[in-house]
Image (cartoon, helix red, strand yellow):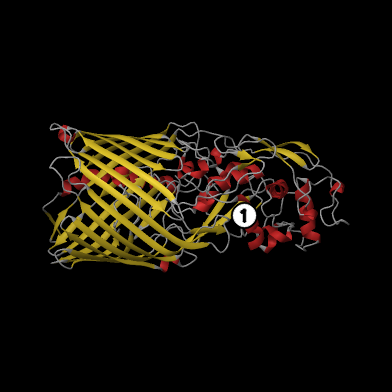
Amino acid sequence: MSNTRRWGWIVAGIAGFASGSVQAAGGAGSKFLGADFSYNGFVRFDVAFSTDDRVQQANQFGDLANGVPVRREPGNPALGFAVPLQPTDALIGPAGIIPLSGLGVLPPTLGVSQQVGLNDTVTRYVPQKNQLLNYHLLRFEITPTLSWGDWSLITRLRAVYDPDDLGYTDFDYRVYDNINGGIEGGLSRQYHTTPDKLGYQVEGNKNPIFFERSGRNYMVDLPAFFVQWNSGNTTVRVGNQTVAWGQLLFFRIMDTANGLDLRRHLILNRALEEYADVRASAPGIRITQQVTDQISADFFAQQFIPTVINNVNTPYNVVASQFTLHDRYDQGGYNKNLNYGIRFKGEFGNYSLQAMFTHRYNPLGAIRWSRSGINKALPNTNVLGLAFNQYCNLVLGTAAQGCGPILAETPFEASPAGLFSAEEWFNYAGYQKLDGLDGFNAVVRDFDAARLLLVRDIGQNADAAANTLSAVFIAGEGLRGHIERHYFSENVFGLGGGYVTEAEPGSIFDQIIMNLEATYTPKRVFTSIDLGRNFDKREEIQIGFVAEKYQRFSTEFPATFLVFQYLWQKNSDLVGFLLDGYGSENYSRNGVVLDAHVPTSANPKITPGIGAGANYVVFGALQPFPNYVYELSAVTLIDVQGGVLFQPGLQWKPRGNLTVNLFYNFVHDNAWGNNPNKNLMHLISQTNELAIRLGYQF
């Protein structure tokens, strides 16, 4: 039995044992070690079925270039790639050092056909496959509490198991190990076998979170494990915990203390639960003080733990799988850093005021190009690869290693399942809210080794970029990119005010709770839209408004919960991407269209950006039925640039301790407008799904 499967059965066994045996141990009012002992918990099964005919575009099986013939026309390196390369040309200089005509035209390689001279038509060899099952988990949680007077020990144990051999259509990198020696580098569980559903690894550490152990299909952690002391108006908590200063659906304006754990279901869980399940805990101290009858103060200091993003080739990942991501959380020493902050809040009748300050490391981090470190020569099975390898041997003196030592100092490796064409390059740049032209130029600018391979800055000339990309992709028979994630400190200042309306009792205008919140971050570090070495630093402003209330429309039904929210951000979107990267068009020189929804042109508009800021609107409602056996809900997140996420839901409680939840995630990235790259929903546009939860509480 493999270690992964063994751990899975262990987790499942713990869940089954605990759900049966803990109930016999006693509930509230029991004694243990001289303390009052109480607990609660649940066992739950979650599943989500895709209703879409596509899989996530960021995954190998969902790559829009799969199965699409694309003609590539390389340029002549000696002439800056501006002129198409001919078989009679020499690779270096007018006098020539390595004449390509002497090498001959080699037979087509895997996935390559119609080779004419040095041009070819390539069809990406990874098959296009649909995903029926997006998500299924067995989950156990228990929250035991021990209390000794003013002291308490509060614990929350969570165990999650994904039976990943059931129902998934998993990509397996091992299938392609016979192509150019397979993939080298990167974390072993993510880039060398099947998808790592629940594990969190960073470079240099397989378990970077102290209170968590995880693997391919299991996770066991303690999201809460702290000692609490209460004395009069003071509460102190020491241990692993979260600090929830924000309670908004989808928006995190003042919720600045903790990052998010997106591994289980991205942001597509039941929206009305806010961020309670995905807010990542961290070890630290929290002190809450009721200063006066009206004013309270809340202080925290915690270890910095980043937002955990979904792993490559899982149904909800958003980082394109043709790239290897190196997370430097441990190697960069960021795990030794602290976040801290303080908030003051005052209640004055119908009015409230709050002010906060947080010094933190941005949990999303910032990503840039990274040297691959992979010393692997270009394949000698094609004309350009052979010619470049000879050039590296004879001119650059790589001692018969071909271009391997040079490529190792660039962000690329000649390995399978990478990028194959300029069309694919530009399509994924737009999808990831990046600039395809400037991203190419950043490689040339930041990596001297790229210039040794005769690659030059091509400015804003898309054809010159296509010529160059075609040449290097033909030579490498596809190239994989390498990127790295770093984290940076920032100061976040926030102000907020609230008001509760008074009108005729029972009217729609009575008891509306309204809050206006704003934060200012003077120097936030973002991922540059060219993935450049120096990142992008600028101010960020967030302004949000929320109005919510309970309104009774019938004497027979409980009150309906209604909520409206609005968020404006100056420079970035809801997840932290710069708005400068929005709106790219696809590139096509030979009539190839990879994404039919995105405008395609031989002279594409590259990242025109959004200058007026990002705007988001949320509407939500929850209607319980009599006796609370049923609850209907509906939540809508709208990106005003044309994207919509709509989630209707039904909750059924056939018994007090049994709960069934059904909700549907409908995502539309082109509800209006003509370019889905202008809105956030394009990143998750393939996640239309029906989600079901079956839960037992104890």
Between 101 and 145, the one nearer to me in the picture: 101
Q: Residue at x 27, y 43 (%)?
A: 563
Q: Which residue is mark 1?
A: 438
Q: Residues within 10 Å of mark 1 (few under 14, many from 20)?
A: many
Lateral position of residue 650 relative to residue 579, left or right = left
Q: Residue at x 59, y 41 (%)?
A: 175
Q: Residue at x 53, y 62 (%)?
A: 535
Lateral position of residue 72 relative to residue 586, left or right = right
Residue 372 drawn at (x, y percent)? 61, 58
Residue 632 drawn at (x, y percent)? 26, 34
Residue 41 is at least partly visible in this image: yes
Q: Residue at x 14, y 64 (%)?
A: 293
Between 582 and 168, the one nearer to me in the picture: 582
**The N terminus - image quarter:** top left
Seen from this angle, which residue lies furthest front?
503
**The C terminus - image quarter:** top left
Q: Quadrant of residue 397?
A: bottom right
Lateral position of residue 55 relative to residue 381, left or right = left
